[in-house]
Amino acid sequence: MALEQGYAACIEVQLLGGNGKDERPTSSVVTPGTHVVYQAELRTDRIIESSSKTYHDDQWVSAEAQVHGHELAIHRVEGEEVIRYSGMQLDDGTLLTEGYIALQAQSASIEFRSVKLLNLKGCTDPNAKNYKSYFVAAAFARCQYERRYTRMLSPELD
């Protein structure tokens, strides 16, 4: 962030709890200093609401963000997809290809029971010990293979 910059340029997964009466979908996308393509349209507004239901009262809710560089982001709540977008970019049009992950509570308390990160870049060779079908980008240098030893059979050893 620049010294006089008001907000971080970021893509936020906005986690909201219900207030007991109003509808407040969780896992919407908030885009200060950025834009996204949503339903084939470049969106310059700062909040795009998800299709998630409102979760009133104190309860644990599972939220997931799956991000593939600037190409695709999917938010899920309780395993159900609630919003999908692409073309993540700064206000000046520069595509976002990397970044940081931050957790914050803004104007409300929140508890995180478990936070898991999964790198989707890895060994995509099905013959390797550490192959995973969910990898979407290849990193062949990370592949691990079993060493195969062969022994010559000899009549005097048998």
Image (cartoon, grey):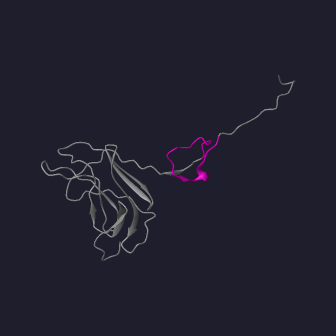
Q: Give the magenta part as a residue range.
A: 125-145
Q: How many marks?
A: 0
In this rendered view, identify the residue nearer to me: 153 or 122.
Answer: 122
Image quarter of the C terminus:
top right
Query: Left of 139 or right of it: where is 92?
Result: left
Instruction: Tell me if I can see residue 146 in this picture.
Output: yes
Q: Position of residue 22 (x, y in %)?
A: 14, 52
Q: Residue furthest right?
A: 156
In this rendered view, identify the residue nearer to me: 81 or 40.
Answer: 40
Is 111 covered by the magenta stretch? no
Q: Residue at x 19, y 44 (%)?
A: 58
**Quadrant housing residue 150:** top right
Magenta stretch, overall SS = loop
Image quarter of the N terminus:
bottom left
Q: Residue at x 31, y 75 (%)?
A: 5
Relative to 78, is 151 above or below? above
Q: Residue at x 64, y 42 (%)?
A: 145
Q: Position of residue 23 (x, y in %)?
A: 17, 51
In this rendered view, identify the residue nearer to me: 43 or 157.
Answer: 43
